[in-house]
Image (tube, grey):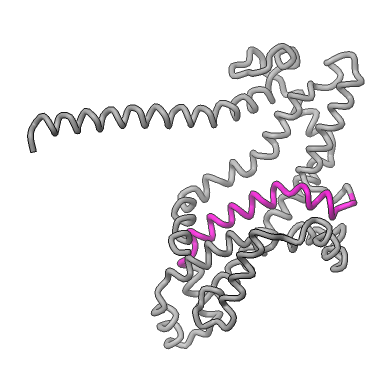
């Protein structure tokens, strides 16, 4: 190959790297700056929040918004409800999703094609809010924590990812296990689940985020305010603080509603930010393993 051509290719590669790196940095900043603004604004003083609309480097720090949010004991009860629902819901959802995915991945399952069609159909069309509410009510789940778990226990998209993962595993694993005396449950728990740990970690994060952010189902099915999850309580705090701010003539009575909103966002997202690094190493691998085949 001529030296000039190699030099030209090397120059083009360097230029591509520079442009690509610049674009990635800009995209990262576009994602990071709003989060930094939310974090900093939640700690900013009342005067600074009122004077500025966008803050990246506050002059003074204040914990008034967090003191206001944590001043009511119900916030800790709401945190407990959300943590309990998230943990229990994630376990139930992963167990049911893995069982259904493994069953539908077996080619010898009778009616497998029809069931798969129903699953895909449910991704495109649903019964709607009112029919779902009537079903939940007829099952006696109103004002029960199970109303936040059972109606959304299996996500069709997550189930399909796990089904495709199980389909990608060689059939010889199941045949060998059955030769050694394992039944179907033994194959599932002793062979398939250990191999599916990356996919389980990824989908568990999806389910955990969904349960932690439960809002609409809590509004529909939970009438007892003592059973509200953290998302509903935080929304009520924002509404109350906005009303008190509008009625008050002094900004010192209640922290600005904008600051409280920023603090609410941080309180709502912090647990998921803490949990994400523990499953990050499995995230990409687990998502891709089940998405190769359709």
Q: Nearer the viewer, residue 205 or 275?
A: 205
Q: Is residue 200 magenta?
A: yes
Residue at image position (90%, 51%) is 224
Q: Is residue 284 magenta?
A: no
Please report the bounds of the magenta region as a residue range.
Answer: 195-224
Residue 65 lies left or right of residue 223; in this view the side is left
Residue at image position (84%, 52%) is 220
Residue 92 lies left or right of residue 98; in this view the side is right
| Quadrant of the snapshot with the N terminus | top left
Q: Which residue extends farthest left?
A: 2
Residue 162 lies left or right of residue 18; in this view the side is right
- Vertically, is 68 above or below 101? above
For the image, the number of numbered tags is: 0
Q: Which residue extends farthest right?
A: 247
- Vertically, is 234 above or below 158? above
Residue 130: x %, y % from top left: 84, 58
Residue 71: x %, y % from top left: 82, 32
- Vertically, is 289 above or below 12? below
Magenta span: helix, strand or loop, mainly?
A: helix
Residue at image position (37%, 30%) is 21
Residue 62: x %, y % from top left: 71, 20
Residue at image position (42%, 88%) is 179
- Vertically, is 87 above or below 31? below
Residue 244: x %, y % from top left: 89, 25
| Location of residue 51 (image quadrant) | top right
């Amino acid at each position: 190959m001529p030296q000039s051509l190699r030099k030209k290719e090397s120059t083009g590669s360097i230029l591509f790297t520079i442009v690509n790196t610049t674009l990635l940095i800009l995209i990262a900043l576009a994602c990071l700056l709003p989060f930094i603004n939310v974090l900093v604004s939640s700690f900013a003083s009342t005067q600074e929040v009122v004077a500025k609309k966008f803050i990246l480097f506050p002059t003074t720090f204040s914990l008034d918004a967090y003191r206001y949010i944590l001043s009511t004991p119900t916030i800790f009860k709401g945190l407990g409800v959300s943590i309990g629902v998230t943990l229990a819901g994630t376990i139930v959802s992963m167990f049911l999703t893995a069982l259904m995915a493994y069953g539908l991945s077996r080619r010898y399952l009778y009616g497998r094609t029809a069931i798969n069609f129903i699953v895909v159909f449910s991704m495109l069309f649903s019964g709607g809010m009112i029919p779902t509410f009537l079903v939940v009510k007829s099952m006696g789940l109103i004002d029960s924590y199970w109303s936040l778990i059972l109606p959304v226990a299996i996500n069709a998209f997550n189930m399909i990812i796990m089904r495709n993962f199980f389909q990608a595993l060689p059939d010889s694993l199941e045949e060998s296990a059955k030769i050694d005396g394992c039944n179907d449950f033994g194959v599932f728990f002793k062979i398939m689940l250990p191999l599916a740990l990356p996919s389980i970690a990824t989908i568990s994060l999806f389910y955990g985020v969904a349960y932690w952010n439960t809002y609409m189902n809590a509004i529909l099915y939970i009438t007892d305010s003592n059973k509200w999850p953290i998302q509903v309580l935080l929304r009520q705090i924002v509404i109350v603080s906005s009303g008190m701010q509008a009625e008050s003539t002094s900004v010192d009575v209640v922290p600005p509603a904008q600051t409280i909103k920023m603090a609410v966002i941080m309180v709502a997202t912090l647990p998921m930010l803490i949990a994400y690094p523990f499953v990050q190493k499995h995230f990409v691998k687990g998502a891709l393993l089940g998405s190769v085949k359709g």
